[in-house]
Amino acid sequence: MFRPIRSYDNYISANIVLQKLEAEGIQAYLQDENTVTIDPILSNAIGGIKLMVYESQVERAAELLAAFEEAYKNAVVCPQCGSVNVQFIPQNSNPANWFSAIVTWLFGSYAIAVKKVYHCYDCDHEFEDIS
């Protein structure tokens, strides 16, 4: 019997985590991956791509996921203040992002921003490259 332990909105991050768990000997699979990949708008309606783990391995998988997330969180450091409270987000002030979002929304299924930056939530510094 398998149980869902996480949900993802895109197949790339879901598959990265799946492969890391499988490398650690955890039996897992992704439910609804094809549906969300083909039509991303359905992601919220069906609960995203669900990471399903064999019931007897749920506790170990949760520990591994916490360790993966902690390592990811500490991987990017703000060059201005040294904080790890940083995320890779669409750049709001870039006019090209607004234009791209409107055009892709009109002619596609959902809006896509072109330019992303790392944003520090402690000092509000934005930067493009991690060093």
Image (cartoon, rainbow, N blue to C red):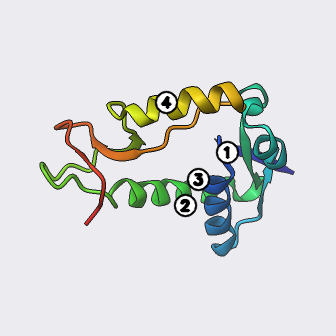
The residue mark sitting in front, 4 or 3, is: 4
Q: Residue at x 42, y 45 (%)?
A: 115
Secondary structure at numbered mark 2: helix
Q: Which residue is drawn at 35% across and 46% down?
A: 117
Alpha carbons under labels 3 and 1: distance apart: 8 Å
**Amino acid type of the residue tagged 1 in the rendering:** Ile
Q: Which of marks 3 and 1 is nearer the N terminus?
A: 1
Alpha carbons under labels 4 and 3: distance apart: 40 Å
Q: Tell me whether the residue at label 3 lies in contact with that at label 1, contact meaning CB atoms closer than 8 angstroms.
A: yes
**Amino acid type of the residue tagged 4 in the rendering:** Phe
Picture layout, residue 33 above or below residue 106: below
In the image, which disc is placed on residue 50?
Answer: none
Image quadrant assignment for residue 104: top right
Relative to 86, 61 lies left or right: right
**Residue sticking out furthest to the left:** 81
Residue 60: tell me if it is visible: yes
Image quadrant assignment for residue 59: bottom right
Give the crowd class for mark 4: few <14, some 14-19, many >=20 residues within 10 Å.
some
Which residue is denoted by mark 2 in the rendering?
A: 64
Q: Where's the C terminus, which quadrant?
A: bottom left
Q: Tell me whether the residue at label 2 lies in contact with that at label 3, contact meaning CB atoms closer than 8 angstroms.
A: yes
Secondary structure at numbered mark 4: helix
Counting every numbered tag in the picture gives: 4
**Residue 11, position in %: x, y?**
69, 52
Which residue is denoted by mark 1 in the rendering?
A: 5
Which residue is denoted by mark 3 in the rendering?
A: 62
